[in-house]
Amino acid sequence: MKIILDAMGGDNAPDATIKGAIKAINEIESEIILVGNEKIINSKIKEFYGKENISEVSDKIKIYNTTETIEMEDIPTQAIKQKKDSSMVVGFNLLKQKQGDVFISAGNSGALLTGATLLVGRIKGVDRPAIAPMLPSYKKGLLLMDAGANTNCKPINLLQFAQMANIYLRKIRNIDKPVIGLLNIGTEETKGNDLTKESYHLIKENAEKYDINFIGNVEGREAFSGKIDAIITDGFTGNVFLKTVEGMGKLVKKSLTENLKKNVFTILGTIPALPAIKKFAKSMDYKEYGGALFLGVKKPVVKAHGSSDEYLFYFTIKQAENFVKSNTVDVIKKEFEKN
C-alpha cells in the first residue's frame, strides 16, 4: 500500500509533513510518497536529521519531485487548471493513475474539492463530495458533514451527506443504527432558513427508503451529548461550527492548565488527579482523530487540517491507512449503485 502525501500543502509545510511522515512510517505497513520540491525536502532532511536525503532516514519514504505549490489564497479552479506541476495536482494524478492508494493534503480546501471532483471524479449518484471529520463527543465520536467543501448547498446535497454519513458509520465504524441530526437553530421543523427547512423535510421523507435513523433538527449545544452520531449541515455552517469547537477546546485546555498551575497548592492537589486529567485531555484533542475523510469521490482522499503540525500529520497518516483498509469508498459506491 502507498500513501501519497502533499508535502507542500498546509500552513506548516513542508516541516510538519516531513516530520509527521517520518514519525508514522515505522508504525504503518504502507510506503509514503512525499510529493513536492525535492531540493526543499532534502534540505529540510539535512536540517532536521543530518542526512543528505530522505532515503537515509527511511527506505519506505520516496519523493516525487514537483515545482509548483497551490497557495491558500489561490482561486481553486484556476489553481487546479493552471498549476499542473503543483504538489496537489500531481498527487491527485498519481492517485488516479493507481500509483498510490490514498491522497492526503492540508492545502487549499477549495482546490482539494475541485481537484478531487475534476481529476479523481465523483462517485456515481453523488452530486457533491463532502469533508467529514470526526470530532470528540461524550464517550464517542461525532461525524460532521460537511465541514467546508460546499459553502452553498441544495437540500439534495444535505440528503446525500446524510446517506454517506449513514453508510460510513454503519459499514465502517460498525454502528448498528447511527443517530443522524440536522444542525439548526431550533429543534422545531419550522425553524431555520429555507435550506434547513427544505432539507429537514427531504431527509425525513427519504429516511425509511435509505434506512437513515433521522432524529430531526439538533441545536449546536446538544451535538456533543453522546446521543448523536452524525451532524448534517452545509459547508459554510459546518466550517464555522468546526472552528468554533476547536477554539473552545483550546480555551478549555489553556484555562484548565493555568488554573492547575496557579500556585503550589493547586499543583500539589493536581498530582492525584493527573491520570484522569490526561485521559480527559486526550479525549478532547481533535488531533487524535486525524484528518477529515473526503466522502463522495471515487478514490480515498483525506483533508488534513490547514494548521496541522507533525503530530496531526502522524495521526492522519495512520488514519489514511485504515481508511484504505476499510474499503470505505467501495462500500459507498455499492450502496449508491443500489439507489
Image (tube, grey):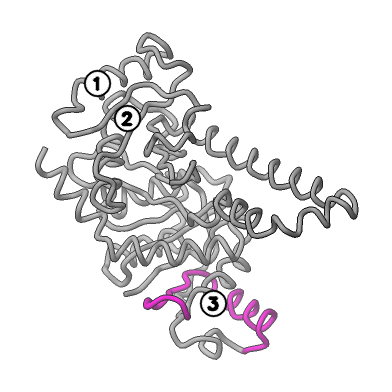
Q: What amino acid is found at the position of numbered circle 1 in the picture? A: Leu
Question: Residue 182, located in which quarter of the rendered image?
Answer: top left
Q: Secondary structure at mark 1?
A: helix
Q: CA distance from mark 1 to mark 3?
A: 46 Å
Instruction: Say if the magenta span includes residue 140.
Output: no
Instruction: Report if the CB atoms under discs 2 and 1 are less than 8 Å apart.
Output: yes
* Numbered circle sitting on residue 202: 1
Which of 183/159 is in front? 183
Q: Which residues are magenta?
A: 26-51
Question: Residue 180, located in which quarter of the rendered image?
Answer: top left
| Residue denoted by label 3 | 22
Q: Residue at x 69, y 58 (%)?
A: 274
Where does the image place residue 260, in percent across and percent down from the top left? 79, 50
Q: What amino acid is found at the position of numbered circle 2 in the picture? A: Leu
Instruction: Say if the magenta span includes residue 46.
Output: yes
Label tally: 3
**Disc 3: CA contacts within 10 A as few (<14), some (14-19) or many (>=20):** some
Q: Secondary structure at mark 2?
A: helix
| Residue denoted by label 2 | 158
Where does the image place residue 279, in percent across and percent down from the top left? 59, 56
230 sits to left or right of 34: left
**Disc 2: CA contacts within 10 A as few (<14), some (14-19) or many (>=20):** many
Q: CA distance from mark 3 to mark 2?
A: 38 Å
Which of 198/38 is in front? 198
